[in-house]
Image (spheres, grey):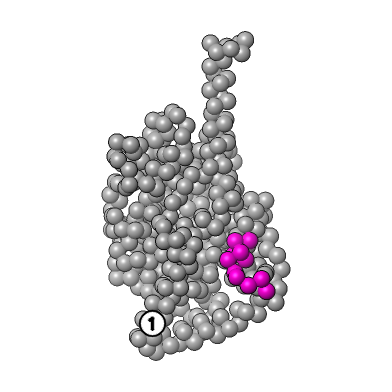
């Protein structure tokens, strides 16, 4: 199938094998120059520059970081602002349910992939700083839903460029730290990126459907187009980006069969996630709601590969949520005023959660410190070995 003149590749096992060998050439080149120029090993400082690059004197900025973050990345030829707007309207209409899907289903769907979970856990950030990373992701999603966010200089555009740089840095650091690329592919490879994209566009729609909303095929395709634009900007090859919802579901199923497996990393990430969600709930009587939500929102193939505690009585609380969602959906379809009102309420709900947790600050995307400390130690040890004489004194 073609998307406005862009021939799409048939996603099969052989193509996915190729995707595991490919990262993001543009970001990887910038990261290589960045680390080649930074011999003082202050990785935290250079990661901080990714976040603060618009607030520092250009002379103090790593040249490759500045060039990459400020380089214009044209929207794809197939970008359709009208379709993007319709995809954003789907989000606005069901923001609370999509938000629940993001926290309780999209993230666990990523944790169920053993190697992908190892990459996430390997940085030390999603286990040690789960809350911050979750809400940085939520903030990015909110920016994607802002009109004009994709344009160069827009909120989503700027954040996505930072994420690409961070992905390149994680690839560089993991490989330097001994990552087995032959057995496990390049860290944060194209199949991993595509699978993550699917968790953000397909899984939330599944959650919305679980709560009783009957979405049209056109609404699903609009939402998919919106996320395909994100995929393009985040460095995924246009030829493998999803065109239609049914094709994306089929491709995602193949990726899940290839990658889903139980892992210690996936379980650690799931445990950290449930603890954060339970910690956000003010009433102790609702302890266990996170596990109930994960069991309510996820498909069996996800739950079979992550360790989620059994649901307790709090699972019954999702019954009124379903009733409310069905009612809201019917009202929106009958009244433009109701549709606008529910959309505004949904956006306010989602943004209110983000603002409460981030205090209105923009996502920081700080360094994976556990990884950088480990890598720095290894590099310093290697340097000591290389500069030591046979007697053990400097040569």
Q: Which residues are magenta?
A: 275-285
Residue sitting at x 41%, y 85% = 332
Q: Quadrant of the N terminus?
A: bottom left
Residue sitting at x 35%, y 85% = 336
- One can see residue 41 in this view: yes
Which is more toward the observer, 14 or 59?
59
Which is more toward the observer, 382 or 235?
382
Q: Residues within 10 Å of mark 1 (few under 14, many from 20)?
A: some
Residue sitting at x 68%, y 60% = 307
Give the percent coordinates (x, y) of residue 234. 40, 53
What residue did someone put label 1 on?
341
Answer left or right for 55 relative to 99.
left
Q: Is residue 65 above or below residue 289?
A: above
Answer left or right for 387 relative to 345.
right
Q: Is residue 39 above or below residue 322?
A: above
* Res 91 quadrant in image: bottom left
* Res 95 quadrant in image: bottom left
Give the percent coordinates (x, y) of residue 214. 48, 81
Name the dominant secondary structure of the magenta segment. helix
């Amino acid at each position: 199938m073609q998307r406005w003149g862009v021939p799409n590749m048939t996603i099969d096992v052989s193509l996915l094998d190729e995707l595991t060998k490919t990262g993001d050439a543009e970001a990887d080149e910038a990261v290589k120059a960045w680390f080649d120029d930074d011999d003082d090993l202050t990785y935290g400082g250079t990661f901080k520059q990714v976040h603060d690059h618009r607030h520092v004197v250009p002379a103090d900025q790593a040249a490759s970081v500045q060039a990459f973050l400020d380089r214009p990345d044209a929207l794809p030829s197939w970008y359709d602002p009208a379709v993007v707007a319709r995809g954003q309207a789907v989000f606005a209409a069901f923001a609370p349910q999509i938000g629940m899907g993001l926290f309780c289903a999209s993230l666990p769907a990523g944790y169920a992939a053993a190697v992908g979970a190892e990459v996430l856990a390997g940085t030390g950030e999603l286990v040690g700083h789960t809350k911050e990373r979750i809400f940085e992701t939520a903030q990015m999603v909110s920016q994607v839903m802002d009109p004009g966010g994709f344009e160069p200089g827009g909120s989503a555009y700027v954040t996505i460029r930072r994420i690409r740089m961070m992905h390149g840095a994680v690839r560089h650091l993991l490989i330097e730290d001994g990552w087995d690329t032959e057995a496990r592919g390049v860290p944060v490879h194209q199949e991993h990126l595509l699978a993550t994209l699917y968790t953000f566009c397909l899984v939330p729609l599944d959650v919305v459907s679980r709560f009783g909303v009957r979405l049209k095929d056109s609404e699903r395709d609009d939402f998919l187009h919106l996320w395909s634009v994100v995929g393009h900007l985040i460095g995924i090859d246009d030829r493998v980006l999803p065109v239609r919802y049914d094709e994306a579901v089929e491709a995602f199923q193949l990726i899940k069969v290839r990658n889903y497996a139980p892992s210690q990393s996936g379980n650690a990430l799931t445990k950290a996630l449930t603890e954060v969600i339970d910690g956000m709930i003010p009433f102790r009587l609702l302890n266990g709601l996170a596990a109930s939500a994960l069991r309510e929102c996820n498909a069996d193939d996800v739950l079979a590969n992550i360790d989620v505690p059994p649901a307790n009585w709090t699972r019954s609380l999702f019954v009124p949520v379903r009733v409310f969602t069905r009612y809201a959906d019917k009202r929106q379809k009958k009244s433009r005023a109701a549709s606008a009102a529910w959309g505004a309420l949904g956006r306010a709900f989602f943004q209110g959660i983000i603002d409460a947790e981030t205090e209105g600050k923009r996502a920081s995307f700080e360094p994976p410190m556990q990884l950088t400390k480990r890598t720095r130690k290894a590099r310093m040890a290697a340097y000591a070995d290389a500069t030591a004489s046979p007697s053990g004194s400097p040569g």
